Image (spheres, rainbow, N blue to C red):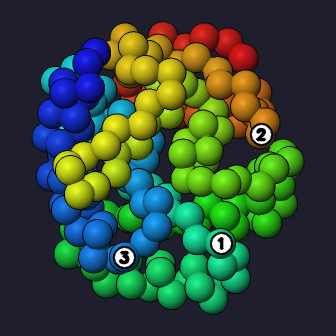
Amino acid sequence: MNEARFVEHALRNFVNSEILARLPALGLNDCWLVSGGLFQSVWNVLTHRDIAHGIKDYDVFYFDPDTSWDAEDAVITRGVALFADLGVDVEIRNQARVHLWYAEKFGVAYPPLRSSCEGIDRFLARACMVGLHPGANGLQLYAPFGLDDVETMTLRPNYAANFSAELYTAKAARWKAMWPELTVLEA
């Protein structure tokens, strides 16, 4: 799948288009719409399902060296107001803070990140590793392993620093139930 086709399919989902159009209003550094809302929208186009089928939430990453909870909470609060009319959950997370809570929540170590794209690099499956950034010259796509796994609906483990076979297997089972066409490679 080429970049233009991926973007076109992902933007068929009105929510993705709206989030990307509004993100600059938050004034965040290194800000990306990432993962599920994108690749799952593409899967829905490819399988002729409703565009929002199976999408639990929409994830936004940004990177701010201020790792205080108060700073992130203020951004989350502004985001809730900005996206309230969309009727979906938009989860905004400062990637500079993830290492502070990830191990406690998921039971796996998580070394500190230096950018939002490094956060994308640590998703459990390669098909998940996508992000769109609304820049001055249009949308920028980040997909470190390309888009083939998205197009072929293949879940392949990404053995990043925080990889957990248990978490991968659980996510794969949920997605396979939603998209039976998926090919799931074992961890």
The residue wearing badge 3 is 27
* Mark 2 or mark 3, earlier in chain: 3
Type of amino acid under label 1? Pro
Q: Report if the CB atoms under discs 2 and 3 are less than 8 Å apart.
A: no
Q: Residue at x 70, y 53 (%)?
A: 113
- List the single residue furthest toward the front: 137
* Mark 2 or mark 1, earlier in chain: 1
Q: Which mark is residue 65?
A: 1
* Mark 3 or mark 1, earlier in chain: 3
The percent position of residue 155, horizontal first and vertical second, equals 52, 19
Taking the image as shown, residue 46 lies to the left or right of residue 55, namely left
The residue wearing badge 2 is 162
Would you say residue 178 is visible in this rendering? yes
- Seen from the viewer's position, the closer of residues 74 and 166 is 74
Q: Residue at x 20, y 49 (%)?
A: 138
Q: What element does badge 3 sit on?
A: loop
Q: What element does badge 1 sit on?
A: loop
Q: Residue at x 23, y 57 (%)?
A: 136
The percent position of residue 66, horizontal first and vertical second, equals 66, 79
Q: Quadrant of the N terminus?
A: top left
Type of amino acid under label 3? Gly
Q: Nearer the viewer, mark 2 or mark 3?
A: 3
Q: Tag count in the figure? A: 3
- Seen from the viewer's position, the closer of residues 15 and 66 is 66
